[in-house]
Image: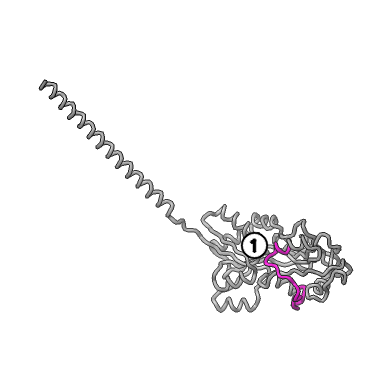
Amino acid sequence: MSQNKNYTIFAIIIALFILISLFSLYGQNNDENIKNTISSNQNNYTADSTDTTLNEIFIKGSDTILPVSIAESESFMELYPENKIIVIGGGSSLGIASFIEGEVEIAMASRKIKDTEIESAIDKGINPVETVIGWDGIAVIVNKNNSFDSLTIEQLKKIYTGEVTNWKELGGQDEEIEVLVRDTSSGTYAFFKEHVLEDEDYSSKAVTEPNTEAIVQTVASDSAAIGYIGLAYADSSVKMLGLETSEGVFHPEQESILQGEYPLARPLQYYTNGEPEGEIGEYINYVLSEQGQVIIKEIGYLPIN
């Protein structure tokens, strides 16, 4: 009996020893797993938290050039991912003002920089240098049901100054003309005012649209509306009018624009502080390259060559 009891005690001791060993081994493995998990998380955190230094370029300004700069920058960043380009519209005047204040590296402008703006820039230590990246023709658009196919510059001026207010005064339908204009920060607004209105004031009844897309949409839905837009924004929902000159009727097409026959042809330009260098120069050189000029043509504008 005593011997059986001893065997029982011995078996219990052996079992306890095995259990203690198992728990010890589990604890070591578990500690090792925890350490590995922490190490892995630390590595992941370090990898996620390490900021890759990017060359940032801020571009701001003309809504006319906006789709060009977006397409060009996306293509450029695919080729050179170490660069980050941020493109913002808002109008040529806003872009030039931000450029003068040193807030952006490139100003987009669909009009020439003014002498007063150059003076303000120089006062702030900014040296505006112009780079023409493409050509545009301001398209005058009307509703597809409008009977007119062309107008003279003088007729346009009378419409936009408010001297003519009904289409019937020009031989068209009996409808009050809905005159659409861009906001005052727009380079297209300024160019049209200078070259069509000869710097006279727009009609007080003119409706200011916030962007070019809004002008297209309004003209497409309003039979009495007339507006002006950058060529790339024209689509089949509206009619582009020809412009009559002493030489004939010309439409905003490549040949007439590049040959200077279309009255409302204009360059599209970037402004930089001094000659573009570094990543800014690389980006602009890309825009001027064969591939970059193809993008400008695909957007709907004309390449410089």
Disc 1 crowd, CA 10 A, few/some/many (<14, 14-19, 20+): many
Residue 108: x and y in percent read 63, 66
Residue 214 appearing in the image: yes
Quadrant of the image for the N terminus? top left
Q: Quadrant of residue 51?
A: bottom left
- Would residue 8 appear left or right of 52 to someone viewing this image? left
Q: Residue 171 appears in which quarter of the rendering? A: bottom right
User: Could you tell whether 240 is left or right of 116 in the image?
Assistant: right
Q: Position of residue 173 (x, y in %)?
A: 87, 66
Q: Secondary structure at mark 1?
A: helix
Residue name at image x 61 percent, y 71 percent: 96
Q: Quadrant of residue 97?
A: bottom right
Number of numbered tags placed on the structure image: 1
In reply to whether residue 288 is colored magenta, the answer given is: no
According to the picture, the residue beneath numbered tag 1 turns out to be 66
Q: Residue furthest front?
A: 1
In the picture, which quadrant includes the C terminus?
Answer: bottom right
Q: Can the viewer see residue 258 in this picture?
A: no
The front one of 14 and 94 is 14
- Measured as percent of width and height from the top left, residue 245 is found at 84, 69
Task: Please provide percent x and percent y for residue 59.
Answer: 59, 64
Q: Which residues are magenta?
A: 195-215
